[in-house]
Image (cartoon, rainbow, N blue to C red):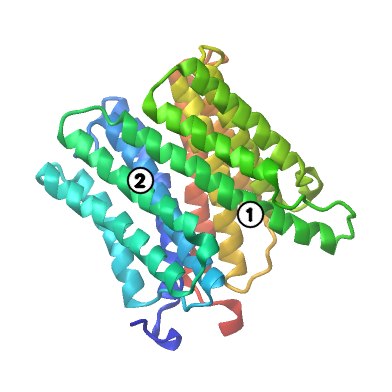
Amino acid sequence: MNILPHQVSPFWSYGFRPFFFSAALFAGIAIPVWVWSLSGAEGVPMHYLLREWHVHEMVFGFLSCVITGFLLTAIPNWTDRPPMRGFPLMLLWALWLAGRLAITASWLAPIVVAMIDAVFLIVVAGIVWRELIGSNAWDRLPIGVLISLYAGANLLFHSLFLNGAATDLAERMALTLIMVLLAMIGGKITPGFTEDFLSDRGFTQQPAEFSAVDGLAILFIGLAGILWMSDVSPTVTGSLFVMAGLMHLVRMSRWYGWLTWSDPLLFILHVGYGWLALSFIILGGAMQGVGLHQADALHALTTGAVGAMTLGVMTRASLGHTGRIKKAGGLTVLIYVLVNLGAILRVFGSFVGFADGQYLGLAVACWSGAYLLFALSYGHILFGQNLSEE
């Protein structure tokens, strides 16, 4: 049973508050720790090898925190049901934190670590299904399916690692699900906010409604992802990813995003979606031996699309859901610049001939710095009361 609103600390009154703040702080610290450990310095003891720890904690640690914050904020709007708050929210956040701590506890038995970490996403999936089914929000059930598969991918990652096998399948499964989630959620909120923006300013152009173009663009991601997970012909898989990227460029061109340049809080969502389309094209090319290496191509998705879109959503939701004007100030614009600069350096640094030491440290400083700056500049908002309550 949820605690009544007047009994709850502001920080525990809505899911975006603890989860957005924690995700930002984690991204701002974990990546520098990883790079520091890569350099040979003695870092934090980790349950996994450095590569597996980095992949797992970004894909299933950091990103699961952002996704949970978003879902706990969006679902009450979808269902007209009260948000999770108070002690239940604290317990859910504690499950996420327990997973992060367990994976650094090298003294714990591997199976115990896996069980502790896996619980969080399983519980999140259960909460999503409970809320959607309880409110008859049948049109949102695909979100429940995707989150359940995401929890399953985390279980698969642990299972493969415990059995001494490569974790590639679980990683590809999770990244495919992330691609689809970004395309579905980004493809819903970005044109929706853009429609409001263009209408308020008297533009005659309006984003196109969801049509076969949008459905096919998302379908191509799913098809390409399934082939990628199956590890079949890289040529065919790469071609599908390139086609998916081109279709998503067409999709976003129908939203008139260039007209929103004067509103950074909205424009960043278009930039993030542009990274998503570009990541498909770059990844598809890499699979066919053209352009970047696959590792660099994947960072177009993870540092570019995920970085820009998560910070775009986090800043907008933090302002809007605390009663503040949804307008990007100087620090918010700097956050957007830093995350995109970090992504550009991480993705294209080696391609233009820079040595690892010349661009990786700067890329990390920019990308993680963007999240730390969010935690610092939005911390008082996330911990404080809504303006209407002050």
Quadrant containing the C terminus is bottom right
Task: State left or right for residue 263 relative to residue 233.
Answer: right
Is residue 311 visible to us here? yes
Residue 22's disc is: none
Disc 1 to disc 2, how far (Cα)? 23 Å
Closer to the camera, 380 or 350?
350
Residue at left offset 37%, top offset 66%: 127
Q: Position of residue 75 (x, y in %)?
A: 50, 67
* Quarter that holds the N terminus: bottom left
Name which quarter of the figure residue 277 lies in: top right
Q: Check the image and report above or below for 78 versus 359.
A: below
Q: Which residue is mark 1?
A: 188
Between discs 1 and 2, the one toward the N terminus = 2
Q: Residue at x 50, y 33 (%)?
A: 223
Tell me if residue 282 can be seen: no
Tag in front: 1 or 2:
1
Q: Is residue 321 above or below residue 336?
A: below
> Along the line of sight, which residue is nearer the eye, 355 or 96?
96
- Apparent side of residue 103 relative to residue 22 in the rendered image (left or right): left
Q: Which residue is mark 2?
A: 60
State the image coordinates of residue 165 (x, y, percent, origin top left): 21, 28
Q: Quadrant of residue 192?
A: bottom right
Question: Label 2 is placed on what type of residue?
Answer: Phe
Amino acid bearing label 1: Lys
Q: Residue 260, relative to residue 139: is it above or below?
A: above
Q: Position of residue 384 (x, y in %)?
A: 50, 73
Marks 2 and 1: in contact by CB < 8 Å?
Answer: no
Give the SS element for disc 1. helix
* Towards the viewer: 164 or 361: 164
- Which residue is rendered at x = 49% and y = 77% of the image? 81
Crowding around mark 1 (Cα neighbors within 10 Å: few <14, some 14 to 19, many 20+) is few
